Structure formats: structure tokens, C-alpha cells
Amino acid sequence: MSFSSLSLMPVLVNRLSQLGYEQPTAIQQQAIPAVLAGKDVLAGAQTGTGKTAAFVLPILQMLLADKVQPLGDNCKALILVPTRELAQQVHQSVEKYAGDSGIKSVIVYGGVSIKAQADAIKAGADIIVATPGRLLDHLRSRVMSLANLNHLVFDEADRMLDMGFRDEIIEVLKRLPKERQTLLFSATLDERIFKFSKRLLRSPQVIETSERNSTAAKIVERVYNLDANKKMPALCHLINKENWQQALLFSRTKQGADKVAAQMKQAGVNAAAFHADLSQAVRESVLAQFKSGEIKALVATDVAARGLDINELNYVVNIELPFQNEDYIHRIGRTGRAGKAGQAITLLSVDDEPQLIKLEAFLDRRLPQQWLQGFEPDLTQVAPVTRKTKKGSLKQQARQKALAQSKRK
Ligand code: AMP
């Protein structure tokens, strides 16, 4: 299937071929015609599936078809995102796909000068890419109005709800025209999202490109069993000796990310932490260094890593499993982007076993476990707690309890 068969206009098709896109991804094949037909859409699509182009391309087409000079209040499309990083990434995608078509995108997020953003908005914007909090600041101070808005997009809606943006979103909605097209993209489609979407969408076309909670097809997942104190040496070994170009590592906490980055630096790996306690300027510079290849290992927290789009990222490592099972899917979706192969590796010590059991129940599949040569767990020190023995001992405990009760009777 080609992009032109999706009824995209030649200027956009040419732009995509300049970018080297040969054919639309699954989400693009389904979403582009629906959006162009003016429908509301509820789409379950993870990062890495090409979801951004799936909403940006048809919106660009509709704006180009109806192009008027953008003036103060002429913003026609609003894309709401949960984080600054995702805002930047989506804004860059809009600019990338718009090329020199004249469509203007303005980015709105907190942590940077409100004045510069207000000036950019006043200078005219066709598309605004915003995080909810800062957008509300601008709407309240009447820097802009969205009275003429035609298209509203929620990108990574599940994460927006996770981050507690519900009230802000509701307040933003009150300031938007009722007659509009609304598109909601979410990595996971669950009851919460369906409920939320009911307030927002009118007879939406529901699109799911892969099984619920399943991961992109080309990601190889591996779990290495090792002792907790061997995680760092194993990590440095993998990065240095296995010739990994670059890796994105995940830590549950900001402090953990700092610690791992410092230990890796000590071991001679150029690493940096990436989390919400760092200033926006530092985060941007770290990200630029990672993208340029200067930094080999980026140690991120879940919130900060959301929305990162790094091409050619072959390795994602879970130093420990995330608190939320959904985050496992978000994490490993950072690799295997747009059909490229990627590896997602989990370092698992005995303490992590309960979390793995929960994760496997959530994913409804087992994750293959193996030993890493040279870092095999010390079986003389710690009794291996396998699922089998664990289940067995639970059953045994239950039997003993039942026996004791029957004796008491
Ligand atoms: P996304 O899921 O929107 O974050 O996109 C993931 C990556 O895939 C981005 O780097 C896009 O530039 C790239 N991409 C999106 N659509 C295509 C396509 N049809 N062909 C090749 N690459 C694509």
C-alpha cells in the first residue's frame, strides 16, 4: 500500500518520499482515511508504530486544503500531550511533515518563558502542541483563544490520566468549540480510557493495530537472572564488551537513575541520568548528546522517558522492573521503532521475582529467562526462587493450613 492510495495530497506524499518513508504503517493505513473523512477516532497505538504521522498527516492535509493566513485566533488544531519531551517531539514531527508548506506549529509547555510562547502564539499558529497546564495558563490570561478550533488530538491519553491531568483537560475542553473533530491516541486501551473517551468522542472509529497490551513485533525480550550486586558489572560488560552502540536504561527512581549513571561513569561508560529533577535546559542538552551518540547510556525514569524518539535505539534495559506494568510496554517500545529490530533486556534478581510474576500475568505471557555467561547467579548463596518452587511452596503452605484447621475441628 502506498501513501497516495490513502488519498494524501501530492505535496505530502512527496515530502514522505523525501523522508524515505516507503509505505504507511498499520496505524497510518487505518487512521489516515478515518481522520480525512472527518470522523472522531479512538486509537490504541504504542510509540514506535508511526502514530504521530497517523494524526499529523491528515490534519496537515485538512489545514492545507483550507489554508487561511494564521492570525492571532486562527489556530485550527490542538495536540495535547502529557510531557514537554513529547511536545517537542510532536512539534518536530509536524515541522518535518509540513516541510515548507507554510503550516505553522507552535509549542506550549511549562518550565520555560511564558512571554516568548505568548509572542509566538500571537504571531500566528495553525497547530498548537501543548501540555495541559501551560495551555490553560495561556487560555486564562487570554493570550489566545481556541474559538475557531476544528481538530483536537490527545496523544498518549493514558499517560495524561496517569499524570493527573484530568481536571486541566476538562477545563481546557470548556474553552473549545463543541463542533470539532476529536482524536484520542493511547498506548493502552482499557476501561478507564473508554470511559474517558465517552465524554470526548462522538461515534468514534475504534482502531487497534496490535493486540491489547502487546508489544511491537520486532522487539526481542530477554530476562537475565543474576544476583542484585551483579547488575552493574553485567550492564557495563554488556555495553562495553558486546559492542552496544547505545542503550536506554530504566530506573524506578530519580535517585536510582543518578546512582546508576554515576557508577557507569566510574566504570568508564559515558552515561547520564534523565529525569524530572533536571532543568529543562539540562534535559535538552543531555538528550542532544545522547542523540549525537556522545552519551552511550541514558539512565531514565519512566515519566521522563515518555515520548523520547530516538532513531536506531537498539537496546532498552530494565535495571529493575517498573512499578506499573503498563510502563514495561512503554519502556520497551523505545526500541524496535518503525519496524526496526530491537532488544529489551530485563536484569532480574531474586527480589524482582514477585514483580515479574505480576507483569507476566498482565502481559498474559511468559518472558524467557536465561543466564548471562560470566554473571550466573550464585546458587550457593541464595536459594533460587523459581515460579515452580514458589507456587509449590504456596500450595504446600495451603495444604498445611488446611490440615491444621481440620485437626482443630
Ligand atoms: P511514532 O510512533 O510516531 O513515535 O514514530 C516512530 C518513528 O517512526 C519516528 O521516528 C518516525 O519518523 C518513523 N516513521 C513513522 N512513520 C513511518 C513510515 N511510514 N515509514 C518509516 N518510518 C516511519
Image (spheres, grey):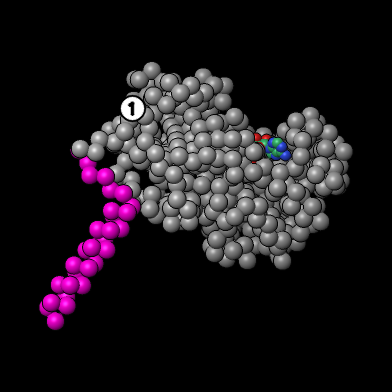
Q: From the viewer's perspective, is 351 left or right of 170?
A: left
Residue 259 image position (x, y, % from top left): 34, 30
Q: How many numbered marks does the figure carry? A: 1
Residue at the spot 56% in from the left edge and 47% down from the top edge: 215
Residue at the spot 26% in from the left edge and 61% down from the top edge: 394
Q: Is residue 134 visible?
A: no
Residue 16 image position (x, y, % from top left): 78, 35
Ligand 1 shown in quarter: top right
Position of 154 relative to 88 (above/below): below
Residue 12 image position (x, y, % from top left): 82, 38
Residue at the spot 25% in from the left edge and 35% down from the top edge: 378
Q: Which residue is mark 1?
A: 374
- Image quadrant of residue 225? top left
Is 406 within the magenta?
A: yes
Q: Is residue 236 visible?
A: yes
Q: Is mark 1 within 8 Å of ligand 1?
A: no
Q: Foreground: 156 or 143? A: 156
Quarter holding the N terminus? top right
Residue at the spot 17% in from the left edge and 72% down from the top edge: 403
Position of 159 relative to 240 (above/below): below
Q: Which region is colored magenta? A: 381-409
Give, as a three-letter code, the residue at label 1: Gly
Is 169 within the magenta?
A: no
Position of 242 relative to 105 (above/below): above
